[in-house]
Structures are given as C-alpha cells and as structure tokens.
Image (spheres, rainbow, N blue to C red):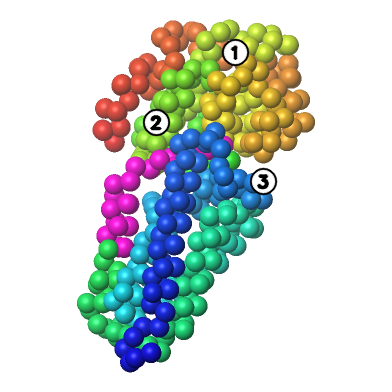
Amino acid sequence: MTKGTLPRRGLILAVAVVGIVLSLVLEYVHYRAYTAPMAASVCTLGERLDCASVALSKYSVLLGVPLPVWGFAGFLAIGLAAVFRSRLLLPLSALAALASMLLFGLSAFSIGSVCVWCEAVHVASLVLFGLALAARRAELAPLSAAEPTVLSLAPSLGFLLAAALFVPPYWGAFGWKGDLPFAYGQTPEGTHWIGAAAPKLTIEEFVDYSCPHCRVASALNLRRLAQHPDELRIVRRYYPRISCGPSGDNRCLAFRIAHCAGEQGRFWQTDRWLFEHFDTRVEYDLNEASRDIRLDRARLGDCVEADATYEWSVNVWKSAKKLRIAGTPYYLVGDRLMAQDGIPPLLDAL
C-alpha cells in the first residue's frame, strides 16, 4: 500500500452503496405500511419478525423525516467521506453504528418486533465502522480541511432538508399496528377525537365503514392532521347508511367493534382496520380483529354483544339522522354542515 492511499476504500464504497440500496428498500416498506397496510410484506414472518410493526411505530420518523431517509443520507455521507478521504469517515461510521445498536434495542424491547431489512442496514453500519477503524491510520484530510468536509456532508444535509420540507407526511395516516402519532381522547359526550389538545379548528367527521369514499377521505384528513398537529382536531362521528338494529342484529357491527376497542385504548387503530377490511367481508371476524389490533378477544366479544352497546349504536344512528346529513363522508364544524370540499379553506385559514 502506498502512502496516502485509503485502505479498503473500494470496500467501504461498496458497503455504503449497499446501505443506500437497503435504505431505499426500507423507505418503500415504510411508505407501503402507511399507504397500503393490507399489502403483503415479504419481510413479515410473524409477530416478532414484522417490518410493518417497526415501520408503524412512533420511532420510525425523526424530526419530520422517516428513518430510512436518514439512513440514506448517512450512508451517502460515509461513502463521500471515503471518496474525498475525509477524517469524518470514522466519526460518521461510529455514529451510524451507535444509532444502529440503539434502534435494534428499541425494536426488540420497545416495539416487540424486528425488521429483516432494518437488521441488514444495521449490519452494514457495523461493517462500515469496522472498515473505518482499519483505515484510521491512512493519510486523511484533517477535520479542519473545509473542502473534504463540505463535499462529504453538503449533499446529505441538502437531501435531509429537502425531505423535511417537501416530502408529504404520508405517515400521518397511521396504520392499525402502530402507536398513535398524535394526542387523542374523548369528548364529554364520549366521542373519540385525535389531534390537537387545544385545537383552533375541530372537524367532526361523519363516516360509515362500508363507504369507500369515507376510507379515502379519512386517510386524507389524517395526513392534513399531520400538517397541523397543534391546530387541528378530528372527532369521529358515524352516519350508518342502514339503521342500527336491536340486540342480535349485526347491521352496525363495525361501529360496535370500534366502540368496544375504544374501551381497550385502541379506538383509532381499530378505525383504520375497519376501513381497510370493509370490502373483503360482510361479517367481521372478531378473532382476526383482536389479533391484528392486539385486543383482548374475550373482552371485545362481551362488549360487542352487550345490550348497552346495541343501545349505543341505535342512538348513534338516531342522532345522525336528526342532523339531516346529506351523505358520507360529511363534516360538522361548529354549527355548519359541509362536504369534503369545504375543508381546505378552513385549513388555509389556520
């Protein structure tokens, strides 16, 4: 090896490229977990090995940027540090290795699932750190050298800034497996809300889980909520397209499932699950719902069939009828009823 040659530079570049590719794969997985939660994932192999659970966790987005995008930027910076022989190579790779170990710990112990693609990224980070350690005696540009530092960091920092400013917050429409990214609670009347604790704008959204337009509109409004988390609150209201019946009648089963899931603290996850499953069955399988949403099956079943729950669903239908709502989805803002096209001007005024 001649003086001034960075040992294993070609290998460092190759591993950095692998990390970039893996980060792009992970970003695709992250995007699909939020926008198409029913899509099958090749890396979901059980409860403990589930990429979707990791992607849908509250740890998957940092400072408004998905973690796979951070990974892409990190591997890019490490690769460029090798190209320009910057002494940033070792601290950058050390930071990546430390982040990988922390994220593995969060996945294993806080989320309860690990992701195959994530662990491949973590391995790439550790390999890069080992290669950077081996290269630490090479003749590298000093940390004070402006040009290698700028050339190594500027593209990644610019990429992160662009992602923070221009990537739509698709993760605002959370899935049923993940934690809620917003505050949530119940109104004094017992209806469920999500969004700002002290809202400037409250939108009561009337839906029917068997309405495909409601599914699209609800996801859209959750993404809007991600853009206005401190000003906007969404309240879930129902307008069943058929009347809810007495005990033993399952015409409003979906609403009763959501109501009972709320007693277990999983209302909004159940709300998402019901929207995604409405077109695949006439009857909802409580076993499947309990497994997917992580509910106590016995408690859910007892609540769904309770006389009080049937009475609640009938009252929900009657109260919506009294408002003379034109259809679903429909919205109540203050004392004004409006369709979907009335929402954007209200948001623009925030």
Find out whether residue 175 is within the magenta segment: yes
Q: Which mark is residue 220?
A: 2
Q: Is residue 195 above or below residue 9?
A: above
Residue 172 screen position, x and y as percent = 43, 40
Which of discs 1 and 2 lies nearer the camera? The answer is 2
Q: Which residue is mark 3?
A: 46
- The amino acid sitting under disc 2 is Leu
Q: Which mark is residue 315?
A: 1
The residue under the point 34% across, 91% down is 2
Judge from the rendering whether residue 341 lies leftward or rightward of residue 247; answer left or right.
Answer: left
Which of discs 3 and 1 lies nearer the camera? The answer is 3
Q: SS at mark 2?
A: helix
Q: Residues within 10 Å of mark 2 (few under 14, many from 20)?
A: some
Res. 333 image quadrant: top left
Label 3 to label 2: alpha-carbon separation:
30 Å
Judge from the rendering whether residue 155 lies leftward or rightward of residue 251; answer left or right.
Answer: left
